Image (cartoon, rainbow, N blue to C red):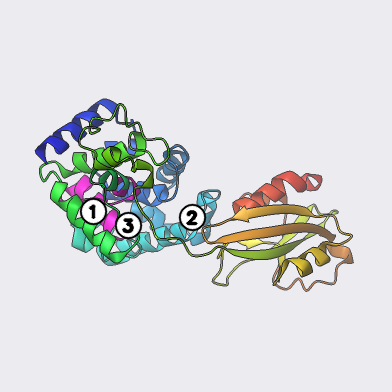
Amino acid sequence: MVHFQRELINWYQENKRDLPWRKTTDPYKVWLSEVILQQTRVVQGRAYYEKFVSSYPTVNHLASATEEQVLNLWKGLGYYSRARNLHKTAIQVVSGFGGIFPKNYEGLLTLTGIGPYTAAAISSFCFDEPRAVLDGNVFRVLSRLHNIATPINTSSGFKEFSDLATALLKSKDPATYNQAIMEFGALQCTPKAPKCESCCFNVECLSLKEGVVKERPQKLKKTKTKTRFLLFTVLYDNEYKTVFLRKRTEKDIWQNFYDFKLTEFLDEDSFLLAQKKRTCYNKIHKLTHQTLQVCFIKEDVRKSKVDLSDFRPYNLSQIENIPLSALHQKYIDDSLGFLK
């Protein structure tokens, strides 16, 4: 155990990346980075982290923003429920804790949207609490090193890995240890092309000995992806250089974002039939458990019979200040240049 800790931290000191959230023990900034980096690569996440810190330097600033402003700043990052939960948690910290994050793991778990991993990260990085982090990188390192075949996305698997991660944790300076094992998984013990030949643990790595590195970690098969067929009617007014958008309030993808008039079809045949003899902008857009087959069609609002009671006109400069999905933003960038 001591050998593993020592070798891991030595590797980290020589190979760690220079990242802004590693230069602070402010729980607000550490929490912000962790939320942004969920399901986001560091290269992309860093730019968003810097935008958020610049726009909302403290949790009080973030709590004072509107959800719409937060979603707009998050635009393009995906998984928008993270942004909504980010805003809710900020409000909770300000209203329930006077703008001060709880200083321990158990207290952090009482906050909306903060689970065991994020609570362990904040408590160890900011308050030196010996709590082992367990993210995708850590699962991968431990499963390969110890050749554990238990699926990581099961309750028994989570307990097994959690117990092992806790046993291996360096209780003195847990922040450095936790950062080290995550960084090792991100840079050395990578998902598809691990650098086993240069790995400081290649002698003791059990999955390498057994030739099953690429099979670790194990996961139970995911839920089958659902396919949806969405047709957006882009109502425009060429005279006033505007398009008509509505806010999505229903509990579905892109909640509280803005979109065009939407018609959803139950099957591909009816979806294709609706496109017949119309000029369509077609896209396939993949979400976590959904594949969207999407068609955008333009329609002159002056010739349309659509009820506009839920819609408002926006010119292109106004659109820049409202939250849109990446899919909608790409369509606007590609196809609505005539409204400039």
Instruction: Out of 216 and 86, give the one closest to the viewer.
Output: 216
For marks 3 and 1 on the same chain, the one whose residue lies earlier in the sequence: 1
The answer to whether 8 appears left or right of 319 in the picture is left
- Measured in 3D between alpha carbons, the distance from the residue under mark 3 to the one under mark 1, in whole angstroms, is 18 Å
Residue beneath disc 3: 152
What residue is rendered at 51% in x and 49% in y? 77
Q: What stretch is highlighted in magenta?
A: 114-139
Within-10-Å neighbours for mark 1: few <14, some 14–19, many 20+: many
What residue is rendered at 36% in x and 59% in y? 90
**Looking at the image, do the residues carrying marks 2 and 1 touch, with CB atoms under 8 Å apart?**
no
- Measured in 3D between alpha carbons, the distance from the residue under mark 2 to the one under mark 1, in whole angstroms, is 25 Å
Q: Is residue 180 magenta?
A: no
Instruction: Out of 154 and 329, give the one closest to the viewer.
Output: 154
- On the image, the x and y values in percent for residue 325 come to 60, 55
The answer to whether 129 appears left or right of 219 in the picture is left
- On the image, the x and y values in percent for residue 273 come to 82, 66
Quarter holding residue 93: bottom left
Helix, strand or loop status at disc 1: helix
For marks 2 and 1 on the same chain, the one whose residue lies earlier in the sequence: 2
Residue beneath disc 2: 70
Q: In which quarter of the image is the N terminus?
A: top left
For marks 2 and 3 on the same chain, the one whose residue lies earlier in the sequence: 2
Residue type indicated by callout 1: Ala
